[in-house]
Image (tube, grey):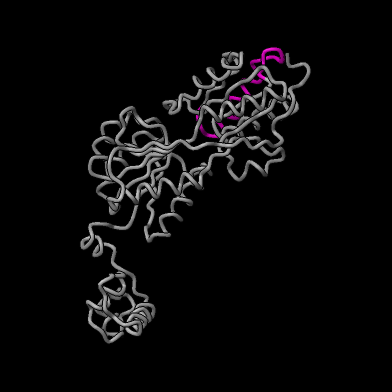
Amino acid sequence: MQHPLKRPTLRDVAENAGVAVSTVSSILNGRTDSWASQETKERVFAAARALNYRPNRMAQALRSSHFRAATLVVPDLLNPLFALLARAIQRSMEQVGYELLIEDSEGNLEREKKILNDVASHNTDGVILILSTDSAPHAERLDELSRTFPVVQIGLPMPGSRIDTLQSDWTMSLRKAIDHLMKLGHRSLGFVDSMAGRNDVLGRVATFRNELKQVGLTLDQRNLVRCHHEVNDVRVATGRWASETVPGERASAFICTNDFTALGTIRGLLDAGLSVPDDISVVGFDDIPLASYLPRPLTTIAQPMAQMAAAASQILLDRISGKMQGPATHHIFATSLIIRESTAQPPKNSY
């Protein structure tokens, strides 16, 4: 009788099915050179189910040099965007029998460095990275890691990077948001940058200034709100902006770093007695599920997260298997503007 705490082995399955251990191994591992009959295969699978047999991943790794597991590093699992991305990547991996280990750097640079230093020594075959900052602080380690370990990064690549990267088209996203607001009649646009204290991965503020310049507008420094990424920090910073400006100086619309930032912005504006969108319009970025369920659903830029997750997973798996070789690849994904109720024509007294 099988001891209740003893993990079933291949030998247990073989004895239950009345076949050799090598036969069980070839059948359960799907080896193409197995000569077992269909009846034998069914008997082995039935025995494995009856014993609740699970393969020993460490033993498999010793035989194949693969753990059939990957690691995903995210900057903040409290942000729904990264939670959704993690789920999508996990599902992609599960479809091919891979497990996904998730590391949350919590937006902490030192914690991020430790994760990158340790990841190759874990029971994992490769890593997908979403960094909380740009790649510069990790440049040396990433270069070293990528020489012997498959790495895929979702974010802006370093010049000359040896790492496969995927990113949304931030510049075109801003252009879509600005065009939408200008069509509504807005001419004074502000930006809520929640990347303060971090390196600006995509040069968001500089790109925003440049895109405004392309349409004959400028960013009034008074309408640049900079804060940390926590929602309450955004709320406080936006409320402070409202108290320190007067209607003639204020932007009539804000574009925000992401949807979480937009939520904090809206709350800060409401605290200051301002209405969205009657007094000020707000545009987010990401299109998290909550965005469409707010009292005033959020106008936002949607990233193709499912496509990016699938592509990142496939690239990593192809690098692990050796199917994909050669220089790093870089992929840019188009975004789409989702118009909802947080944007409207500017108030008549805004200029």
Q: Position of residue 277 (x, y in %)?
A: 72, 29
Q: Nearer the viewer, residue 260 or 209?
A: 209
105 shown above or below 209: below
> Which residue occupies 39% across, 47% down?
72
Q: Which residue is at the front of the view, 172 or 150?
A: 172
Residue 275 drawn at (x, y percent): 73, 28
Horizontal placement of 226 versus 6: left or right?
Answer: right
Let me know if residue 260 appears in the view: no
Question: Is residue 247 part of the magenta span, yes or no?
Answer: yes
Q: Can you say which quadrant of the picture contains the C terminus?
A: top right
Q: Residue furthest right?
A: 348
> Magenta part of the protein: which range?
228-251
Residue at 60 percent across and 33 percent down: it is 284
Task: Give how far across and how far down residue 336 sits, in percent.
Answer: 59, 37
114 w.r.t. 343: above or below: below
Q: Residue at x 32, y 83 (%)?
A: 40
Position in image of residue 39 (x %, y %): 35, 85
How many labels, in total?
0
Q: Could you tell me which residue is drawn at 77 percent across and 16 percent down?
A: 349
Q: Is residue 335 above or below residue 189?
A: below
Q: Is residue 35 magenta?
A: no
* For residue 329, side relative to residue 64 (left or right): right
Q: Is residue 142 visible?
A: yes
| Image quarter (top left, top right, bottom left or bottom right) of the N terminus | bottom left
